Image: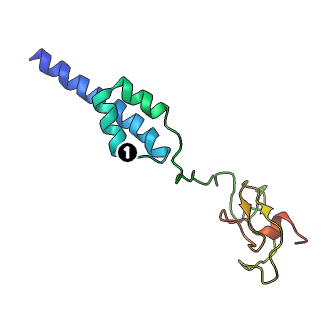
Amino acid sequence: MEVIGILLVALIVQGIFAAIFANFADQKGHSFALYFLACFFFSLIGYLMVAALPDSPHYVPPLRTDFIVKNNPQSPYPTNNGCTASPVVQSAPASNWTCTCGRINPGNKNSCACGVLRCNIYPNK
């Protein structure tokens, strides 16, 4: 009976570690289920596989917006400080512009995906 209890605890611990490493693989843009099974059955080899995984070519890291507080006058990156801009500029595309979040936007866009307006960064453009 003690052997069954020890095996059950070992399987639970192995499942927890497999889920943790499968979550890392999922964050890199790979299959959670595939790497869960690999980590569960192959243990250390599965963990090393996940550690060596590159980011998937289709992986887009989540946009960091924790530093942007919308419509807060004390925010260093207010989304609207009195300027109004349509989403698309009607004139010929200008050069690309970089938002405060680091995203490079095409010249014909007046707002970034994070919500910051171009005229808040470049008031004369």
- Image quadrant assignment for residue 46: top left
Place of residue 11 in the rendered image (x, y in percent of width and height, measured from the top left): 24, 27
The N terminus is located in which quarter? top left
Q: Residue furthest top?
A: 2
Place of residue 5 in the rendered image (x, y in percent of width and height, measured from the top left): 16, 21
Whether residue 115 is situated above or below residue 37 in the rendered picture: below
Place of residue 35 in the rendered image (x, y in percent of width and height, measured from the top left): 36, 39
Place of residue 73 in the rendered image (x, y in percent of width and height, measured from the top left): 78, 62
Graded by Cα atoms within 10 Å as few (under 14), some (14 to 19) or many (20 or more), the crowding at tag 1 reads many
Residue drawn at 68 percent across, 66 percent down: 115
Towards the viewer: 92 or 78: 92
Towards the viewer: 62 or 78: 62
Whether residue 60 is situated above or below residue 28 in the rendered picture: below
- Image quadrant assignment for residue 98: bottom right
Whether residue 117 is situated above or below residue 59 in the rendered picture: below
Residue drawn at 39 percent across, 47 percent down: 31
The C terminus is located in which quarter? bottom right
Residue drawn at 78 percent across, 78 percent down: 84
- Residue wearing tag 1: 32
Q: As shown in the figure, which amino acid type bears the numbered disc 1?
A: Phe
Q: Residue furthest front?
A: 57
Element type where label 1 sits in the image: helix
Q: Is residue 91 left or right of residue 38?
A: right
Residue drawn at 40 percent across, 35 percent down: 20
Q: Residue furthest left?
A: 1
Q: Residue furthest bottom?
A: 90
